[in-house]
Amino acid sequence: MRKPLLLNIVLTLVWVALTGAYVLDNFVLGFALGFIALRFALGKTARRYFLFLPRLTGFILFFIWELLKSNFQVALDVITPPFYMKPGIVAVPLDAQTDAEISLLANLITLTPGTLSLDVSDDRKVLYVHVMYLNDEQQFVDSIKRGFERRLLNLMR
């Protein structure tokens, strides 16, 4: 996966040098054009690379959406008189196995307002999460499993 990425960066730099416009938009355009050119040139030999970038983009957009939703929920609760908080601690069973996968998942959960990763069980099968708005425990577990964990594992494997 490293070689196609380096080739894509080289093509991007060549594009920017040829056009002479050293602005972010031109870098993004050059990267996209390089990606398309490599897709046709390399075909199936770099399949993992061509799957990774769209997944990464989708993952980043998903995280931004979740971040905005939770920020709005916390901000709305803070500025309205009756507080709707129902805090609780939830045990989330993990499909993530490596230290990197578990750490990234825990950090993504902690970065989202209203949730905080507390601990991982000794056998690394359960992540304990403090939730500010716990209406339904199973619904929260499902949202983590189907949202963050599934997308993260899709990206890393």
Image: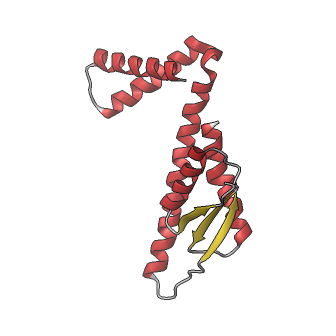
| Image-based side of 74 in relation to 148, left or right | left
Quarter of the rendering occupied by the N terminus: top right
Residue lying furthest front: 122
Residue lying furthest top: 41
Q: In this view, does 23 lie above or below 7?
A: below
Q: Which of 99 and 7 is in front in this view?
A: 99
Q: Nearer the viewer, residue 73 or 151?
A: 151
Q: Which of 89 and 83 is in front in this view?
A: 89
Q: In this view, does 137 lie above or below 63?
A: below
Q: In which quarter of the image is residue 43?
A: top right
- Which residue is at 65% across, 36% downward? 157
Count how many numbered circles sit on residues in the image.
0
- Which residue is at 49% across, 72% downward? 74
Q: Where is residue 41 in the image (x, y as percent from the top left)?
A: 56, 11
Q: In which quarter of the image is residue 139?
A: bottom right
| Image-based side of 45 in relation to 82, left or right | right
Q: Is residue 121 above or below residue 148?
A: below
Q: Position of residue 55 (x, y in %)?
A: 59, 37
- Which residue is at 58% across, 32% downward? 52
Q: Is residue 57 above or below residue 73?
A: above
Q: Where is residue 51 in the image (x, y as percent from the top left)?
A: 61, 30
- Which residue is at 56% across, 65% downward? 118
Residue lying furthest right: 138
Q: Quadrant of residue 54?
A: top right
Q: Where is residue 138 in the image (x, y as percent from the top left)?
A: 74, 67
The colouring scheme, among rainbow, by chain, secondary structure or one colour, is: secondary structure
| Image-based side of 2 in relation to 51, left or right | left
